[in-house]
Image: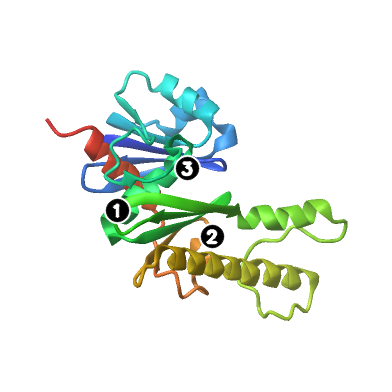
Amino acid sequence: MARAEFLLIDNSNSFTKFALASRDAVGPSRKIPTAKLDPPMLAHTLRGWKFDRVVLCSVVPKKAALISKALAAFPLCPVSHRTRLGVGIDYPRPATIGADRLANAAAALHFFGAPVVVVDFGTAVTFDIIDSRGCYAGGVIAPGLEAMTDYLHQRTALLPRISLIEPPAALGKSTKHAMLAGAIFGYRGLVREILRQIKSELGARRLHVAATGGYAELIASGVKEIHGVAPGLTLEGLRLIGNLNFPPP
């Protein structure tokens, strides 16, 4: 039976990720589709795990309420702008910042320093900017890669649903390859231009860019402005936030 101090939960639109963590490292993890998350599925997913405290970031309020109720026996830290994050916030309406974005910001500042941008390739692609003062300064939200390609399939009679992989060339020799070229090369162009604008507006001579999320490896492989891929960045942020909000005795 696995035991740890923290249970970390990243409740996003598509999937909910669970991980055990000590104060120093994230441990084993599990993932389920958020649409299937209910009390029996939650109990099944956590079977065999023991933990003392819970750190939760959620962008799905109904599921967050379900999780909070099911784990009411444990001290629980819901991540928000009111939580101790280790990151300042310079944003007009901080309550509107997604909890996952705050977790990403906390991890990025800790691991990479400031200024830094996190590009999270999830259901939406988000860009979160931490300025040279170590403050969350704003962000960008664009449609996710799957949302764009699924929309083409749903709204046209002849375009298929495709699996997203590296296209063989920009000159598509089939409908599938033409769609892949438009999606992957077009998306990389979107990412580059947004990063160019961010760097210009920050006036930054040096700007570290970290990518995370499901399609981070695929897109970052062709975008030299992205300096590295950090697959577990959100969970690392939750671990760091857990340390701040549950100080050791």
Left or right, 8 with reference to 52: right
Q: Quadrant of residue 153?
A: bottom right
Q: Nearer the viewer, residue 98 or 92?
A: 92
Name the disc covering residue 31, or none: 3
Left or right, 64 with reference to 188: left
Q: Nearer the viewer, residue 79 or 4?
A: 79
Q: Position of residue 118 (x, y in %)?
A: 42, 57
Q: Position of residue 221 (x, y in %)?
A: 49, 72
Measure the alpha-carbon separation of dots 1 and 3: 31 Å
Q: Position of residue 12 (x, y in %)?
A: 51, 41
Measure the alpha-carbon separation of dots 2 and 3: 16 Å
The residue identified by callout 2 is 215
Q: Nearer the viewer, mark 2 or mark 1?
A: 1
Can residue 2 be seen? Answer: no
Amino acid type shown at disc 3: Lys
Amino acid type shown at disc 1: Gly
Image quadrant where one finds the C terminus: top left
- Mark 2 and 1 residues: CB-CB less than 8 Å, in contact? no
Q: Secondary structure at mark 3?
A: strand
Name the disc covering residue 134, or none: 1
Left or right, 136 with reference to 52: right
Amino acid type shown at disc 2: Tyr
Of the residues under marks 2 and 1, which one precedes in the sequence? 1
Left or right, 223 with reference to 179: left
Image quadrant where one finds the N terminus: top left
Q: Is residue 149 above or below residue 16?
A: below
Of the residues under marks 2 and 3, which one precedes in the sequence? 3
What's the image's color scheme?
A: rainbow
| Residue sitting at x 23%, y 38% | 244
Q: Secondary structure at mark 1?
A: loop
Q: Is residue 63 above or below residue 235?
A: above
Q: Nearer the viewer, mark 1 or mark 3?
A: 1
